[in-house]
Amino acid sequence: GAVVSQHPSRVICKSGTSVKIECRSLDFQATTMFWYRQFPKKSLMLMATSNEGSKATYEQGVEKDKFLINHASLTLSTLTVTSAHPEDSSFYICSAWTSTNEQFFGPGTRLTVL
Amino acid sequence: DAKTTQPPSMDCAEGRAANLPCNHSTISGNEYVYWYRQIHSQGPQYIIHGLKNNETNEMASLIITEDRKSSTLILPHATLRDTAVYYCIVRVGGGNQGGKLIFGQGTELSVKP
């Protein structure tokens, strides 16, 4: 199946710093990508829809100034967690649709904010 | 948005078929049903999707009732590696390469030797 990668797989940062997470579609182009986060023992929560060449669409309750999304090309979307705090520690996962109506997910990025 | 209801947990004996039910009674006529599974600390893995007809691939079969209000995912010969949380999701909106997948709580399937 199609492959979606994320980098880094794991990051630890100090409170107040910003962290950038990359999501790439490796063998297909994606005009739309999605960002989720998942807390321990909980389900995935959709944060935002990343649109190539235009602004991201955020789900209700997600701070757009806190979670900056850039979708600069058809294969790359980035999520920047600005001024991270311990409560932002979570598992962040991206996904993208293929042309065959399958949505593939990346392996996830574990963020720990100290 | 159409929502899904799944049992929180199920057990299955290794080598037997695992039948995972899902209710989606408010599904609209053009909304697809998707199934994913997630093994601990990994991204969700696509399994199968369907609209009206039953579907089968190398991983599983998807049986959708005629009224489309429920579906069943069948893993024909469960192995220990199939132990995971299984999510039944109704795609919200969008055509090709569109729409959102809103995850519910899923079913935690435990395959036992």
Image: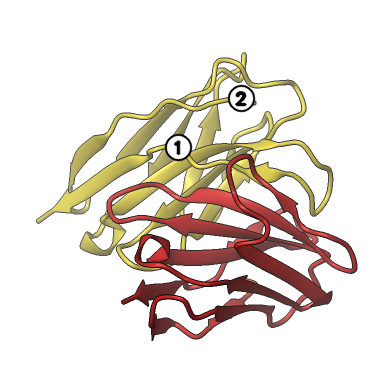
Chain colours: A red, B yellow
Q: Please determine whether, in this image, residue A13 is positioned above or below residue B51.
A: below
Identity of the amino acid at label 2? Ala
| Mark 1: few/some/many CA within 10 Å (<14, 14-19, 20+) | some
State the image coordinates of residue B29 (x, y, percent, origin top left). Answer: 75, 21
Q: Quadrant of the C terminus of chain A?
A: bottom left
Q: Which residue is mark 1?
A: B104
Q: Please determine whether, in this image, residue B100 is positioned above or below residue A30.
A: above
In-image side of A16 versus B32 (left or right): left
In-image side of B74 versus B7 (left or right): right
State the image coordinates of residue B60 (x, y, percent, origin top left). Answer: 46, 50
Q: Which residue is mark 2?
A: B2
Q: Are marks 1 and 2 in one subunit? A: yes
Q: Please determine whether, in this image, residue B90 is positioned above or below residue A98.
A: above
In primary-sequence order, the first of circles 1 and 2 is 2
Q: Residue at x 33, y 49 (%)?
A: B85
Q: Nearer the viewer, residue B14 or B37?
A: B37
- The extreme left residue here reads B113
State the image coordinates of residue A110 (x, y, percent, origin top left). Answer: 39, 74
Q: Residue at x 60, y 60 (%)?
A: A35
Identity of the amino acid at label 1? Gly
Residue B70: image tag:
none
Q: Residue at x 22, y 53 (%)?
A: B15
Q: Quadrant of the N terminus of chain A?
A: bottom right
Residue B76 at least partly seen: no
Q: Nearer the viewer, residue A69 or B78?
A: A69
- Element under disc 2: loop
- The extreme right residue here reads A53
What is the spatial separation of the Cα atoms under label 1 and label 2, in whole angstroms?
Answer: 11 Å
